[in-house]
Image (spheres, grey):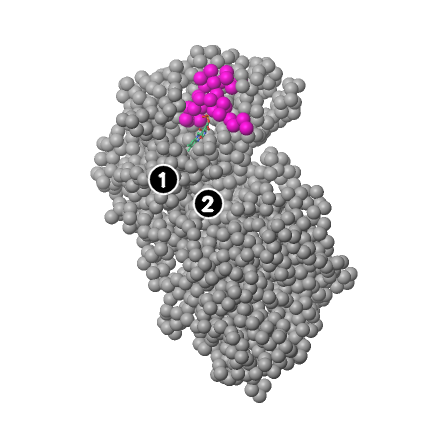
């Protein structure tokens, strides 16, 4: 199904934000829309967005590589993005990431065998006073998880695993 | 003293429209639109001495005055990209005191004749954007946004726009490119946004904190605001305190508060009560201040911090104690800048790649004294040549750490 | 008057127009500031930072507004950092130092940065020898590397960006010239940067990949060996190549090119063309060429070329000597006398055509131009004149494009028209279907097939469009035969001519009529007196036909039939075409790459081309063959040299009066300056040292009023209720004689296809991409089906020169493929 068929209302709302002669501005929100379901933007969606905004598919593709929150490839259902930037690292973020990965049996950047979560180190999330912190990126958007411990995180993953559905 | 920006700390429900109104909310906007000329609004802001809180400290009223009046429409863009490592103040404002920020956006828009304003939030602030969208809808419903405001001919809409994970999009021209649906790479300047901004139209880009000051300045006047802070830096500032302190967090204090006060009085001192070794006052982009008593007693305002060979920037104070070695620290900052370099200009793109290899060798224990020298020389070679300030930022910690903490690097290459 | 500004660059006083960039001002003064991302044809990007210079401006006293003096000299306020010369505009009294210690250090440091991730594969790089990076490294580069080679960034080295262009991601220095060229110049943004930082890389996501007909130009302006053509990759080293100035013969634009040649063992010791490069002519093609011009040159070296004369003996074409063949041809023509007919194609040079015309005149025979576009006599009347340059058109000017798909028919005109529209010219596109130009048009006018002429006649009556035509400062009209045959296009030409004449837009520079001809020199043929024949099949009947550079039998089965019914057929060709196969005598012609001559472009500019490679086998130049036949008939025709033929031509044909080979070879300084030692500035485009060409004199000047031509009454053919109407259209890449030998273009040429409206397809049970059988002119052909919702229902676009018999709008039947 095309995006236009799936999300007619949202698309209308997004386009309404920008002057019609500058509808290319809608590119970023449309890319979020496109990756809502599968967690990445596939070729189909890229072409559709290009057509909608009257730009070339190449120009759409060029955005996905530039911005880290867009993904051109599938990964785990939920991405756990742990900040290991300087301020968090000063408060033990590196160790948190290592411990979490060890608990999940993956390397940083890896995905659990069941395809449930991908754990990635990321740059500063603007929550430096609440380290360790990570954000989750999934079908429902992005959510912050602050002052985390490995136990709390594992509980989150467990809950997700049991419910079999997306958890914030 | 009561907070001016972090007012939710005094008035817990201020994100409720009624509560905000009860506490004088939207009065300033109403006063501006119904009683003041746009030029007068700008003049008050100029007289208040308000300087941009996004890092550069540029006088806000002056920026508004630069708007090209022969080219319309005008736009206002709020910079809510907040991506400097160690900065987390704009998020607290937007999450807790959203109406004051939005009112600031509205007043700025009125002052420069804009009928549309965009709030560009970093992509990670997805929930914040959704929250602001709610608040904007409430304002529209209550008649504070939309057509013919307060019975005048002035109309205004505010829209949120999410970035998607790129520090460079905090740089105002990269932000505008991104808002136009392009790769967030900085533009050539001049022309600056007040001449050539969003869609090529005159645009004011201001930081969230900057704008949040505006309603109270309009309500209470320029002199009231100037009475706080220092001669060089008027008013209050939110200091984002992070790193090896006991109580990290945002502290709204007048300019001129000393580092010592911030770290010990507000931040509760250093973890395990160890000594402070260094301070980065402007996030990862800082020149690293080597701490001694004199440094600790330096007032935090733009001019005074400069006497320490550093900048106040966005006042993201990262505190480093003696457990931290500078080669470890540079490994972090260089990783950050290498990851965030947009790739448009040569020195930043190639220089950071090169620096990364050098620091990995040095920090990894396979480096030599020549590598340390080379690292400093590459950093200096980047300086003064880049298209935007990111490249320059990437070198600040490198040069200052190697110059001010040579012993750390000696140790690193000898172990 | 443009305001002038005087500044000092490296101690030299330079005066340039206000607004000039420092880098360009320096260039004009003979000072080469190194650049990578800057290109004089594009807005500065200021991203490579190579052009760093010291820059100072006179200090101004705030109180008095006067310059501050120091020892009687204006005191200079130096910029605190090095500045980019490509982004700073000159100002009065500015002082620029491009080679001071500080500036050179800055430039060296940038270069060192670039080299940290550039592979050191110069010995195997195609750009080696003409690489700006390599050259600048010799000038500025550090003697030794401070960067550890094993820490170099690695990336994919052999990435095909489509069939024509290859990318080496390791060599790319992220200057963005290619990306910006595609977006800003070509208007086809099918290249982009992906990723960011050191991972930044060039991508294309179009379908087909790198979907642009200007892609080759990116290889000229790429300052390193990152972008190379599939054709030339690993083909030769630039320093082994010889160059010959020439013209592209693929369309009527007349792009100036250079053939690079080399003698090589793998071609049996022959000298062969290794690549086609643009040659600067700012009034024609600037510094660009299209991909057809760049890649469709392989016909010269094709083994299928005719190598010796052939004579039909016992029903078989058999080798013969030139004596025999010429004697026979002459005898046949002599016997026919005025019953001979000379049919010439616009691939021939002015000299060839002149000799043919003289031969025809000597025999009293008809001289026919083989073309489907009419109206050249009108172009002779009110075509372009001296002083015309499409680059001058902009705001206040109007360009009308009628019944023409410029993109497919004359790419560089498309580019220049689009650029004029970008500069503010009003573009009006009038056609039965959508074309690539619509996007850039101010007004798009569609007509139902058959209504082309009435629609054009009605334009002046339309409010805004009428005003745009009437009030245009300058008015240019391009027309062709999109969807039409010769009759249709003749009447379109007449309607267009009327618009120009009625509104007084002719007889002065930048005004007039341009025929978008199928060949490089159709306009020359018209000027020399050739005329097309509306019913060629009938005209051929019983005639002794001498055909040069045309393949009517290959194009149209009806013409093949007519030739079978003709008397004797004599064919002068490069290849054994369908027409040659029907001949009694076949005369092998030299390709234009093997000789010299002149073409007259659609803009009526006469330009020279020079020999690039030796003549193939026993071939002779067309004008020589014709002269030798003529001599056997007692006619005084010149066989000595093209220049001598041209002298006779200028003496006899008024439009050519005053021209000479020497005049055509004159050059003037052009901007931007290209082709000097600093290849980093303009790219590898060749400097024009061999002639910019000269416009023919306009027959009608603005003072006199030419006779308004008569326009066909009524409508052209229309689709019928129950049958599709096949209309001929031109495709850039087709199976034309000079195209099909280029193997590289096979995918772009594709299979024969018809294009119909989706609703038509639905009605006929056809789907996009499926095969179908079509019946056209009594023949069946298998074709692919393409869909396009912009074309009128009931119409099928059928490409010319793709093996489908479509010389005129005609009924078409479609059935399922077997
Ligand atoms: C690399 C870079 C990153 C920046 N990031 C931010 C940011 O996250 N938030 C911000 O407000 N300003 C940021 N700035 C500063 C903006 O370019 C701009 O100066 C500011 O938004 C102006 O607002 P102000 O005058 O209110 O400070 C950044 C600048 C640079 C060079
Ligand atoms: S491929 Fe060439 S032209 Fe394109 S960005 Fe790279 S170096 Fe520049
Ligand atoms: S920055 Fe001037 S040439 Fe690239």
Q: Residues within 10 Å of mark 2 (few under 14, many from 20)?
A: few
Q: Residues within 10 Å of mark 1 (few under 14, many from 20)?
A: some
Vertical arrangement, residue B260 with respect to residue C116, above or below:
above
Residue at position x 49%, y 57% in the image: C694
Q: Chain of mark 1?
A: C
Location of residue C608 in the rendering, given as x and y in whole percent from the top left corner: 47, 62
- The numbered disc on residue C42 is 2
- The numbered disc on residue B310 is none
Residue at position x 49%, y 23% in the image: B65
Closest to the observer: C259 or C114?
A: C259
Residue C294 seen anywhere in this rendered image of the structure: no
Vertical arrangement, residue B145 with respect to residue C325, above or below:
above
Q: Chain of mark 2?
A: C
Closest to the observer: C539 or C668?
A: C668
Closest to the observer: B165 or A162?
A: B165
Vertical arrangement, residue B357 with respect to residue B242, above or below:
below
**The furthest residue to the right:** C721
Location of residue C330 in the rendering, given as x and y in whole percent from the top left corner: 55, 81
In the image, residue C284 lies in the stretch drawn in magenta? no
Location of residue C203 in the rendering, given as x and y in whole percent from the top left corner: 47, 50
Give the mark, 2 or 1, whose residue is nearer the N terminus.
Answer: 1
**The furthest residue to the bottom:** C314
Q: Secondary structure at mark 2?
A: loop
Q: Which residue is mark 1?
A: C14
The quarter of the image holding the C terminus of chain A is: top right
Residue at position x 64%, y 48% in the image: C504
Residue at position x 49%, y 72% in the image: C638
What segment is highlighted magenta in the picture? B41-70
Q: Secondary structure at mark 1?
A: strand
Q: Give the alpha-carbon distance from disc 2 to disc 1, as whole Å.
A: 23 Å
Closest to the observer: B151 or C187?
A: C187
């Amino acid at each position: 199904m095309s995006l236009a068929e799936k999300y007619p209302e949202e698309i209308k709302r997004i386009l309404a934000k920008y002057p019609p002669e500058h509808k290319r501005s809608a590119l970023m929100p449309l890319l979020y829309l496109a990756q809502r379901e599968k967690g990445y933007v596939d070729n189909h969606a890229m072409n559709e967005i290009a057509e909608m905004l009257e730009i070339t598919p190449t120009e759409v593709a060029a955005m996905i590589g530039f911005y880290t929150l867009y993904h051109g490839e599938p990964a785990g259902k939920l991405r756990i993005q742990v900040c290991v930037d300087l301020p968090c690292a000063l408060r033990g973020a590196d160790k948190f990431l290592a411990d979490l990965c060890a608990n999940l049996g993956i390397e940083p950047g890896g995905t659990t065998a069941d395809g449930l979560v991908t754990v990635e180190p990321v740059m500063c999330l603007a929550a430096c006073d609440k380290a360790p912190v990570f954000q989750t990126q999934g079908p429902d958007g992005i959510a912050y998880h602050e002052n985390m411990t490995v136990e709390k995180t594992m509980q989150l993953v467990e809950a997700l695993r049991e419910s079999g559905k997306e958890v914030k | 003293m009561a907070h001016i920006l972090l007012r939710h700390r005094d008035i817990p429900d201020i994100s409720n429209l009624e509560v905000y109104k009860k506490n004088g909310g939207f009065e300033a906007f109403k006063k501006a639109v119904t009683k003041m000329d746009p030029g007068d609004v700008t003049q008050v802001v100029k007289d208040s001495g308000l300087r941009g809180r996004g890092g550069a400290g540029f006088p806000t009223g002056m920026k508004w005055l630069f708007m090209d009046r022969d080219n319309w429409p005008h736009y206002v863009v709020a910079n809510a990209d907040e991506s400097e490592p160690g900065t987390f103040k704009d998020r607290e404002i937007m999450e807790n005191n959203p109406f004051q920020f939005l009112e600031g956006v509205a007043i700025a828009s009125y002052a420069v004749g804009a009928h549309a304003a965009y709030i560009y939030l970093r992509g990670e602030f997805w929930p914040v954007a959704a929250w602001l969208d709610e608040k904007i809808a409430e304002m529209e419903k209550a008649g504070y946004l939309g057509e013919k405001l307060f019975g005048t001919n002035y109309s205004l809409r505010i829209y949120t726009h999410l970035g998607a994970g790129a520090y460079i999009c905090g740089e105002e021209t990269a932000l505008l490119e991104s808002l136009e649906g392009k790769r967030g790479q900085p533009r050539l300047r001049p022309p600056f946004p007040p001449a050539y901004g969003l869609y090529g139209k005159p645009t004011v880009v201001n930081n969230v904190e900057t704008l949040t000051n505006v309603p109270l300045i309009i309500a209470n006047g320029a002199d009231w605001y100037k009475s706080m802070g220092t001669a060089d830096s008027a008013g209050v500032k939110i200091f984002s305190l992070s790193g090896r302190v006991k109580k990290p967090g945002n502290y709204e204090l007048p300019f001129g508060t000393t580092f010592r006060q911030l770290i010990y009085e507000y931040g509760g001192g250093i973890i395990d009560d160890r000594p402070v070794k260094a301070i980065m006052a402007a996030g990862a982009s800082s020149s690293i201040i080597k701490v001694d008593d004199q440094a600790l007693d330096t007032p935090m305002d733009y001019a005074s911090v400069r006497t320490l060979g550093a900048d106040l920037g966005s006042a993201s104070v990262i505190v480093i104690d003696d457990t931290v070695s500078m080669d470890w620290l540079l490994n972090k900052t260089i990783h950050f800048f290498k990851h965030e370099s947009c790739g448009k200009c040569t020195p930043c793109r190639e220089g950071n790649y090169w620096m990364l290899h050098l620091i990995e060798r040095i920090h990894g224990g396979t480096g030599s004294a020549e590598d340390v020298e080379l690292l400093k020389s590459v950093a200096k070679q980047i300086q003064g040549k880049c298209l935007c300030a990111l490249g320059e930022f990437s070198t600040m910690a490198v040069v200052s750490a190697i110059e001010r903490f040579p012993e750390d690097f000696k140790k690193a290459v000898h172990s | 008057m443009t305001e002038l500004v005087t500044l000092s660059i490296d101690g030299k006083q330079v005066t340039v127009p206000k607004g000039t960039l420092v880098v360009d001002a320096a260039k004009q003064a003979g000072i080469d500031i190194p650049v990578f991302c800057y290109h004089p044809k594009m807005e500065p990007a200021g991203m490579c930072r190579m052009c760093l210079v010291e820059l100072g401006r006179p200090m101004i006293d705030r109180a008095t507004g006067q310059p501050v003096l120091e020892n009687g000299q204006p005191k200079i306020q130096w910029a605190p950092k090095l500045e980019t010369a490509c982004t700073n505009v000159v100002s009065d009294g500015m002082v620029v130092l491009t080679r001071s210690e500080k500036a050179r250090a800055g430039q060296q440091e940038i270069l060192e940065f670039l080299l940290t991730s550039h592979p050191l594969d110069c010995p195997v790089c195609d750009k080696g020898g003409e690489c700006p990076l390599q050259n600048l490294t010799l000038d500025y580069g550090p003697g030794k590397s401070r960067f550890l080679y094993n820490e170099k960034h690695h990336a994919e080295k052999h990435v095909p960006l489509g069939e024509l262009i290859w990318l080496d991601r390791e060599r790319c220095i992220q200057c963005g010239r290619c990306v910006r060229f595609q977006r800003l110049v070509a208007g086809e943004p099918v290249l982009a940067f992906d990723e960011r930082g050191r991972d930044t890389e060039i991508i294309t996501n179009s379908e087909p990949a790198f979907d642009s007909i200007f892609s080759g130009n990116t290889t000229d302006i790429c300052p390193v060996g990152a972008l190379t053509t599939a054709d030339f990759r690993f083909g030769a080293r630039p320093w082994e190549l010889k160059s010959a100035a020439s013209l592209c013969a693929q369309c009527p634009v007349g792009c100036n090119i250079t053939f690079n040649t080399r003698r090589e063992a793998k071609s049996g010791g022959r000298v062969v063309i290794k690549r086609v490069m643009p040659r600067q002519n700012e009034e024609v093609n600037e510094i660009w060429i299209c991909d057809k011009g760049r890649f469709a040159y392989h016909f010269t070296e094709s083994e299928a070329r005719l190598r010796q004369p052939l004579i039909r003996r016992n029903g078989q074409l058999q080798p013969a000597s030139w004596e025999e063949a010429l004697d026979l041809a002459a005898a046949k023509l002599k016997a026919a006398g005025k019953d001979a007919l000379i049919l010439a194609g616009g691939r021939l040079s002015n000299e060839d055509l002149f000799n043919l015309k003289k031969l025809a005149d000597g025999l009293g025979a008809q001289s026919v131009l083989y073309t489907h576009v009419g109206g050249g006599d009108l172009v002779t009347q009110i075509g372009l004149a001296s002083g015309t340059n499409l680059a001058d058109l902009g705001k206040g000017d109007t360009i009308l494009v009628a019944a023409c798909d410029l993109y497919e028919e004359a790419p560089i005109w498309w580019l220049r028209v689009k650029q004029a529209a970008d500069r503010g010219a009003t573009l009006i596109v009038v056609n039965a279907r959508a074309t690539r130009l619509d996007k850039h048009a101010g007004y798009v006018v569609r007509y139902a097939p058959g209504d082309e002429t009435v629609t054009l006649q009605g334009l002046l009556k339309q409010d805004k469009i009428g005003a745009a035509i009437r009030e245009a400062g300058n008015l240019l009209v391009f027309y062709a035969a999109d969807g039409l045959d010769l009759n249709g296009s003749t009447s379109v030409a007449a309607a267009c001519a009327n618009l120009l004449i009625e509104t007084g837009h002719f007889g002065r520079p930048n005004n007039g009529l341009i025929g978008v001809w199928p060949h490089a020199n159709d306009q020359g043929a018209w000027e020399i007196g050739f005329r097309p024949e509306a019913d060629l099949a009938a005209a051929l009947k019983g005639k002794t036909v001498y055909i040069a550079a045309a393949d009517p039998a290959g194009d149209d089965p009806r013409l093949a039939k007519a030739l079978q019914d003709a008397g004797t057929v004599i064919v002068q060709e490069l290849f054994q075409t369908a027409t040659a196969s029907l001949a009694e005598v076949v005369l092998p012609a030299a390709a234009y790459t093997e000789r010299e001559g002149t073409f007259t472009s659609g803009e009526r500019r006469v330009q020279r081309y020079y020999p690039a490679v030796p003549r193939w086998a026993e071939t002779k130049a067309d004008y020589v063959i014709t002269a030798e036949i003529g001599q056997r008939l007692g006619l005084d025709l010149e066989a000595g040299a093209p220049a001598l033929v041209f002298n006779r031509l200028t003496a006899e044909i008024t439009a050519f009066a005053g021209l000479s080979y020497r005049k055509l070879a004159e050059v003037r300084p052009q901007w931007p300056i290209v082709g000097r030692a600093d290849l980093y500035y303009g790219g590898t485009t060749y400097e024009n040292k061999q002639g910019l060409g000269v416009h023919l004199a306009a027959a009608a000047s603005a003072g006199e009023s030419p006779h308004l031509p008569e326009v066909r009454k009524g409508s052209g053919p229309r689709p019928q209720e129950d049958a599709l109407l096949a209309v001929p259209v031109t495709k850039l890449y087709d199976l034309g004689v000079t195209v099909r030998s280029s193997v590289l273009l096979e995918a772009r040429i594709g299979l024969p296809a018809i294009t119909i409206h989706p609703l038509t397809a639905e009605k006929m049970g056809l789907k996009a991409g499926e095969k179908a059988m079509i019946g056209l002119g009594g023949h069946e052909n298998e074709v692919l089906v393409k869909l396009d919702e912009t074309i009128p229902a009931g119409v099928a676009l059928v490409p010319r020169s793709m093996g489908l018999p479509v010389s005129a709008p005609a009924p078409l039947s479609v059935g399922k493929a077997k």
